[in-house]
């Protein structure tokens, strides 16, 4: 094992203690994972929400064998002060990872890197290492685990008795999720094994039944002592590092069975068959909910699947040990009979109007009726003249690490990227003043942010990106250039809450453009944004479309989605007439966004980048607070 000197600092919030948990629950979850992984690679700080650190007291036994320090928020590194906790910061203080899912995934990766024998830790990231990787804004599952359930449980624990009679809707949503059929990689093979097991069990229950009758699938009475669940065998064989299943060779009737006729797989753990990070996240939350419910004398009969999951998680090697370290007194729950599925159908964390709108998005037809409808109301796509169409960066006199051509990018693509940067950097340079903080949202490999940091040394530049490898590449380029006015945050946009003067984003996909605009409006910052992937736009928990009052009065959500889908029809391979319609749709979608920002006291221009051939997505917003 490598020398485990803590090189990174982990910062966790501290609001209060309750029973056997530290709140907010994100902190208890992080500490539980550290205990489960037996990870001592981080120097851990608790950051009280109150100002008086000295009066804060943390019960030692809630921390297990972890050494924890108290620190006030004003003592945090500057990059952390701009983020929601939990957060991890590298030794140089420039690279920060923020948000529960990002921090937990990092703890897992660092633990495995330090000790590759801990393969069970890496397995927490699931198939293709994607568990909780998608951000909460686009993944309902990540949102449920990372945000909705922790907040729901915290609200449930603090509510007055008369207000906590009902089970929170997000807990019921999890119960319903646990009742859905499981889809896993190679599940066809496992489902055939399940069918074979079912037939073997049925045949054993009626010894006199002929082989032919069994193969024909005739109904038989179930055994009073059924065979162990195949799903359970598969799940726990992986945990115990054994062969997955000792199922017999498939009978011909099993091989001939259509995939659609195979039995569905049942949930063993939160994401399906295998124990993952999602189970680690949910356990401290559901534990607190169950403890409180038991004290209140509540009947958990309508949560049989959650109860079964809670019992099953306790059987996972290392869970009880980790719980003991954190002084979590795990409950012993009785077996509950699953309720009819229809009883759970009325509960969902997705608002009804969202579900209707998602159904409505499967439309047929072109954009012309919608465009005509807008035109009849005097609304057409309009573009402001480019403020500096001939301005260009002198790329030949810049270090190679500044240029987007550095790396595997083709020369043609590198040229187009340079042209795009000419446009954004020109607009930002015109707005920037010495001492300004510029945030490059959805920064990717840092093409925009690194150029700005190099060309505007009197400004501070912050790069925010959810993809770790992209941000690491940007950090390497920055180090090569010796830039000291730049910092890096790996996080979803919602976890950044710092103040800044200018926000910039090159090709922010779908709803991300609206998220960036929202961040800029909250900070009263100017913005320079090039949108992308209009076809990914859809209503979310936070955003509803159309965005502006002017468009809402004329278009329905479905009509607006038609514009969004056709705004992506701008590729150079398409006929010119079709590209023109796509450009008009882009202009209308962005006009709606511009008018929405103007409703928040902004002056916004929608501009076409020069030359227009620099990208099929060549629109650019320039917005300034008025």
Image (spheres, rainbow, N blue to C red):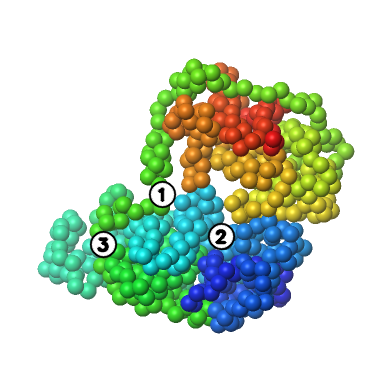
Q: Badge 2 local density, few (<14 within 10 Å), some, or many (20+)?
A: many
For the point 70% across and 28% down, the residue is 609
User: According to the image, label 3 marks what residue?
Assistant: 339
Q: Do callouts 3 and 1 mark residues in contact (Cβ within 8 Å)?
A: no
512 vs 406, left or right, is left
Q: CA distance from mark 2 to mark 1?
A: 21 Å
For the point 43% across and 55% down, the residue is 185
Q: Is residue 49 above or below residue 521?
A: below
Residue 610 coordinates in the image, percent (x, y):
72, 26
> In terms of image quadrants, where is residue 571?
top right
Q: Which residue is more in the foreground, 607 or 337?
A: 607
User: According to the image, label 1 marks what residue?
Assistant: 350
User: According to the image, label 2 marks what residue?
Assistant: 101
Residue lying furthest left:
208
Residue 567 coordinates in the image, percent (x, y):
54, 29
Residue 413 coordinates in the image, percent (x, y):
70, 35
Question: Which comes before the other along the chain, label 2 or label 1?
Answer: 2
Question: Which comes before the other along the chain, label 3 or label 2?
Answer: 2
Q: CA distance from mark 3 to mark 1?
A: 21 Å
> In terms of image quadrants, where is residue 13?
bottom right
For the point 18% across and 60% down, the residue is 214
Q: Which residue is more in the foreground, 131 or 14?
A: 14
Q: Do callouts 3 and 2 mark residues in contact (Cβ within 8 Å)?
A: no
**Kind of element beneath mark 3:** loop
Could you tell me how many numbered marks the image carries? 3
Residue 265 coordinates in the image, percent (x, y):
34, 59
């Amino acid at each position: 094992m490598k020398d485990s000197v803590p090189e990174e600092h982990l910062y966790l919030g501290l609001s209060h203690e309750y029973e056997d948990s530290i709140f907010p629950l994100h902190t208890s979850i992080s500490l539980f994972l550290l205990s489960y992984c037996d990870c001592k690679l981080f120097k851990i700080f608790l950051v009280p929400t109150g100002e008086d650190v000295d009066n804060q007291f943390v019960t030692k036994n809630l921390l297990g064998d972890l050494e924890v320090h108290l620190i006030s928020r004003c003592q945090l590194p500057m990059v952390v002060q701009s983020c929601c906790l939990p957060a991890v910061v590298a030794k140089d203080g420039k690279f920060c990872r923020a948000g529960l899912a990002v921090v937990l995934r990092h703890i897992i990766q660092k633990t495995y890197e330090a000790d590759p024998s801990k393969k069970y830790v890496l397995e927490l990231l699931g198939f293709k290492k994607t568990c909780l990787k998608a951000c909460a804004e686009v993944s309902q599952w990540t949102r449920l685990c990372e945000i909705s359930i922790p907040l729901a449980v915290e609200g449930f624990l603090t509510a007055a008795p008369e207000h906590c009679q009902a089970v929170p809707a997000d807990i019921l949503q999890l119960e319903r999720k646990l009742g859905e059929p499981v889809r896993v990689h190679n599940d066809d093979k496992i489902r055939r094994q399940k069918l074979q097991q079912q037939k073997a069990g049925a045949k054993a229950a009626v010894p006199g039944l002929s082989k032919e009758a069994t193969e024909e699938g005739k109904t038989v009475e179930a055994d009073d002592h059924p065979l162990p669940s195949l799903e359970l065998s598969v799940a726990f064989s992986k945990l115990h590092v054994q062969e997955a299943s000792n199922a017999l060779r498939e009978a011909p009737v099993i091989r001939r069975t259509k995939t659609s006729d195979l039995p569905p797989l049942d949930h063993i753990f939160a994401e399906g068959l295998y124990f993952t990070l999602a189970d680690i996240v949910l356990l401290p939350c559901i534990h607190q909910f169950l403890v409180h419910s038991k004290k209140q004398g509540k009947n958990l009969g309508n949560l049989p699947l959650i109860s079964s999951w809670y019992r099953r998680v306790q059987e996972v090697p290392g869970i009880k040990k980790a719980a003991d370290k954190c002084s979590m007194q795990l409950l012993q729950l009785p077996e509950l009979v699953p309720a009819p599925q229809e009883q759970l159908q009325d509960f969902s964390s997705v608002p009804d109007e969202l579900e209707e709108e998602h159904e409505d998005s499967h439309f047929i037809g072109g954009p012309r009726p919608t465009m005509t409808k807008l035109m009849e109301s005097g609304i057409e796509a309009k573009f402001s003249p480019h403020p500096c169409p001939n301005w260009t960066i002198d790329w030949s006199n810049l270090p190679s690490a500044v240029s987007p051509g550095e790396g595997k990018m083709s020369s043609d693509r590198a040229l187009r990227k340079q042209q795009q940067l000419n446009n954004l950097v020109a607009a930002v340079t015109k707005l920037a003043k010495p001492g300004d903080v510029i945030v490059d949202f959805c920064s990717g490999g840092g093409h925009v942010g690194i150029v700005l940091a190099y060309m505007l040394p009197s400004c501070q530049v912050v790069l925010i990106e959810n993809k770790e490898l992209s941000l690491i590449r940007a950090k390497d380029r920055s180090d090569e250039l010796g830039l000291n006015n730049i910092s890096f945050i790996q996080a979803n946009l919602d976890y950044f809450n710092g103040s800044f003067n200018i926000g910039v984003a090159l090709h922010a996909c779908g709803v991300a453009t609206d998220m960036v605009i929202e961040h800029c409006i909250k900070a009263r910052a100017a913005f320079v944004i090039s949108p992308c992937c209009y076809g990914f736009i859809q209503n979310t928990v936070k955003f509803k479309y159309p965005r502006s009052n002017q468009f809402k009065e004329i278009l329905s959500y479905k009509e607006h989605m038609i514009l969004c889908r056709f705004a992506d029809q701008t590729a150079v391979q398409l006929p010119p007439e079709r590209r023109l319609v796509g450009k008009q749709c882009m202009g209308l979608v962005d006009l709606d966004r511009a008018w929405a920002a103007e409703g928040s006291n902004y002056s916004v221009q929608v501009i076409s980048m020069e030359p227009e051939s620099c990208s099929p997505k060549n629109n650019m917003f320039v917005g300034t607070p008025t």
